[in-house]
Image (tube, helix red, strand yellow):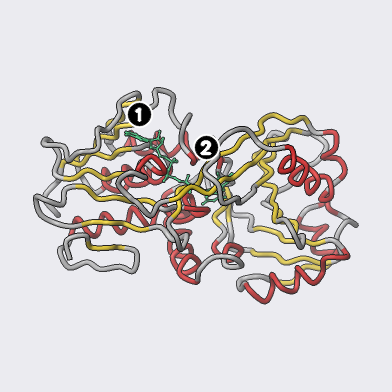
Amino acid sequence: MQQPLTITIAGAGIFGLWQAIMLARQGHKVRVLERVAVPFSEAASQYAGAMIAPYCEAESAEPIVRELGLEAAKLWKEFYPGLIRNGSLVVAGARDQGELRRFARLTVGHSTANAGDIAELEPDLEGRFASGLFFADEAHMPTPDALRDLLEMARSAGAQFEFGTEWNGVADEASDYVIDCRGIAARDDLKTLRGVRGERLVIETQEIAFSRPIRLLHPRYASYIVPWGDGRFLVGATVIESEDDREMTVRSALELLGLAYALHPAFGEAQIVEMTAGVRPSFADNIPRVLAGQGDDNKIIRVNGAFRHGFLLAPVMADIVTKHLGSDNFSHALLIRTDA
Ligand SMILES: Cc1cc2nc3c(=O)[nH]c(=O)nc-3n(C[C@H](O)[C@H](O)[C@H](O)COP(=O)(O)OP(=O)(O)OC[C@H]3O[C@@H](n4cnc5c(N)ncnc54)[C@H](O)[C@@H]3O)c2cc1C
């Protein structure tokens, strides 16, 4: 067993929570500083669709996201009992069958679903779509439940949380390491970090029930609906090159709600519960990194750049940090040595 370390984690978003769980379970003494008093109230993580969808994401992400996403999916299954493992379904309207063929070409891990399969998977979509793709090995979780559960898991593992306490950005004398998980707030220390705006809605209706996330393909927009249970659905998400985190625009609301309505007209009667916008911390290639050195001058390890894959990749990022702290020689494609 490795000598226990004293570790401070700055930021209690999805990256900070997974770091806390894994490091505390390794026997390290973990303290998490979060600058806001109300958990998750300023975290990008609160807006996420929280889909563990390594296959579907391969449509637009680099191959490494799928490779590591598959590894991360195993860790989610192992660690988080709240994961809903019903797969995901991708459909397109009659005029957009070319989009479906394109999506099928760019991804693996799916089977073709005809109208009967779609009706069997999602009875409320019966008769609405002639064909689709079913990704049986994907999963999802209701975001607020997952964040609350992970916080509880980290606490149960022994991590101490100090909400309403801002990390001052310097190496902490009392800690062997500080793990900087501040998301977009770390921009001053990570010059290549940028924000990518994402908007999403939460709607509520008892008229429809889905068992899994459904992506509706369209030539201009990409949208998905994630069922949260109790008649709640997350409808997301825009991807806009902007750091503007003000309220959702009318254009985005029209696009997202239009796609929900196209998926099923009963969404027309749903109540809008939330309309929100967040900023995804992202590096130029949209791939996250662990930036770490060793020795007294390298006490700060930065874990950032989650882009659209914070939930998907958080377990792998925590695994990289845990292994790096356990061995001088550990190497990984996402581990950048700052002392090299
Ligand atoms: C609309 C939308 C949909 C998305 N959908 C998905 C999805 O389906 N799947 C997926 O994997 N990802 C998704 N994402 C992306 C995901 O939400 C982000 O990549 C992820 O949340 C970033 O997590 P983080 O922990 O790095 O940052 P954050 O969640 O922003 O957490 C950083 C925390 O650090 C705190 N902090 C800042 N400064 C300090 C300081 N000085 N001291 C202490 N604490 C500090 C902040 O208050 C915050 O709580 C989506 C994002 C958006 C906006």
Q: Horizontal and vertical percent for residue 119? A: 83, 57
Residue under pointer 2: 46
Which mark is on residue 35?
1
Say which residue appears at 82% left-offset and 65% top-offset.
96
Rendering quarter of residue 258? top right
The crowding category of the residue bearing disc 1, from other C-alpha atoms within 10 Å (few below 14, some 14 to 19, many at least 20), is some
The N terminus sits in image quarter: bottom left
Please, is residue 39 above or below residue 212 in the view? above
231 or 273: nearer the viewer: 273
What is the secondary structure assignment of the residue under circle 2?
helix
> Residue visible at 44% across and 60% down?
284
| Mark-to-mark CA distance, 1 and 2 | 15 Å
* Residue at image point 70% right, 65% down: 134
The answer to whether the beta carbon of the residue marked 2 is less than 8 Å from any atom of ligand 1 is yes
Q: Is mark 1 within 8 Å of ligand 1?
A: yes
**As displayed, is residue 61 above or below residue 190?**
below
The amino acid on which the numbered mark 2 sits, given as a three-letter code, is Gln
Vertical comparison of 313 with 104: above or below: above
Q: Callout 1, which amino acid?
A: Arg
Neighbours of disc 2 within 10 Å: few (<14), some (14-19), many (20+): some
Q: Count the numbered circles shown.
A: 2
